[in-house]
Amino acid sequence: MYPLLLKPAVKDYLWGGTRLKEEYKYECETEIAAEGWVLSCHKDGASVVKNGYMQGKTLPEVLDLWGEKALGKNSEKFPYFPLLIKLIDARDKLSVQVHPDDAYALENEGEYGKTEMWYVVDCDDGAELIYGFKENISKEEFENRIKDNTLTDVCNFVPVHKGDVFFIGAGTLHAIGKGILIAEVQQNSNTTYRVSDYGRLGADGKPRPLHIEKAVDVTKCEKPSMPYGQVGEITKVEDNEVRNLASCEFFSADKLDLNGEFTVGMEENFVSLLCLEGKANLCWDDGRMDINKGDSVFVPAGFKVKLEGKAEILCSYI
């Protein structure tokens, strides 16, 4: 086994922009690059290995060959690869949506639910997003407001700034706003219930479907209960800073501000490294690689790697 440099699966959703192609050098044949699935074993778009003797294989293919040892014992409680990590470039606002929890998703969709975390990598001045409701409302009012197009009147609009963090538990109403670049760490699921799309038309010229009944079933019609914004305890490690962005039963995520040397790796768990800014050398016992802005690396369980350089790196693990 060895650390895998990954090529993301790129999605061209209609609200997306071009920053992932221009700044992060993600390859795709479409004009729009809305999302880069930088760590993915999902059937809708798997990451592909770019280095070493596994080059050209998908991440699921490599993990099938390497076995459970590559994931570590912390992943044993999950009957599937547990994480999906994305970079999201919202040139326009996303639909207002919600995700189900595991129980509801398994019963109705045949896959697991979706809890996620957003880290705001960058944003335009005045950008905002939807995070839950301004006040608690009833399910009946929620449904009625979807149908009469007044839902946004009761949504909690939050101005955003670079470095903000939002924890989006299953059942939380949300929508990324226009002009925001987000790194998202989530459960390995692609189930979304859309409740408003502002009347936009899809690629087929028709309005994109809404999922009102299911959304009403799963949505928590309440104000956000989790702290958000410039949150997360910061720990100094020599000249480096580690900011804890999220810790829950499904995943943990830290932002590493690398300023020199830092060792990453866990005996009991794999680690995903996503370089958000800067560049670094990544070294292990019998190898090394350079990582630059946009690069994603899968570090197998049991590996220790040394990072050297000046960079901002999202570290995700179970």
Image (tube, rainbow, N blue to C red):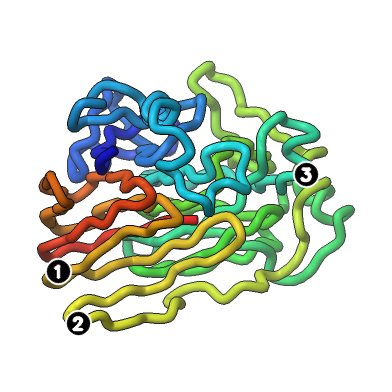
Describe residue 261's horizontal placement relative to residue 120 as left or right: left
- Other-residue count near label 2 (Cα within 10 Å), few / some / many at <14 / 14–19 / ≥20: few
- Other-residue count near label 3 (Cα within 10 Å), few / some / many at <14 / 14–19 / ≥20: few
Q: Secondary structure at mark 2?
A: loop
Q: From what the image shows, is residue 106 above or below residue 102?
A: above
Residue 63 in sight from this viewpoint:
yes
Looking at the image, which residue is at 42% across and 81% down? 233
- Other-residue count near label 1 (Cα within 10 Å), few / some / many at <14 / 14–19 / ≥20: some
> What separation in Å lies between label 3 and label 2 (alpha carbons)?
43 Å
Instruction: Tell which circle, 3 or 1, labels the residue nearer the N-terminal end.
Output: 3
In which quadrant of the rendered view does residue 103 lie?
A: top right
Looking at the rendered structure, which numbered label has been put on residue 261? 1
For disc 3, the marked residue is 103
Describe residue 310's horizontal placement relative to residue 54 as left or right: left
Q: Which one is nearer the viewer's eye here, 276 or 267?
A: 267
Q: Amino acid at mark 1?
A: Glu
Instruction: Tell which circle, 3 or 2, labels the residue nearer the N-terminal end.
Output: 3
Q: Are marks 2 and 1 in contact (CB under 8 Å)?
A: yes
Looking at the image, which residue is at 30% across and 52% down? 303
Q: Which one is nearer the viewer's eye here, 185 or 236?
A: 236
Instruction: Give percent across and percent down for residue 309.
Output: 10, 63
Most distant residue in the right direction: 140
Q: From what the image shows, is residue 7 above or below residue 262?
A: above
Q: Nearer the viewer, mark 3 or mark 2?
A: 2
For disc 2, the marked residue is 238
Q: Amino acid at mark 2?
A: Glu
Instruction: Give percent across and percent down for residue 266.
Output: 37, 59
Looking at the image, which residue is at 12% across and 65% down? 310
Q: From what the image shows, is residue 294 above or below residue 180?
A: above
Quarter of the image where the N terminus is located: top left
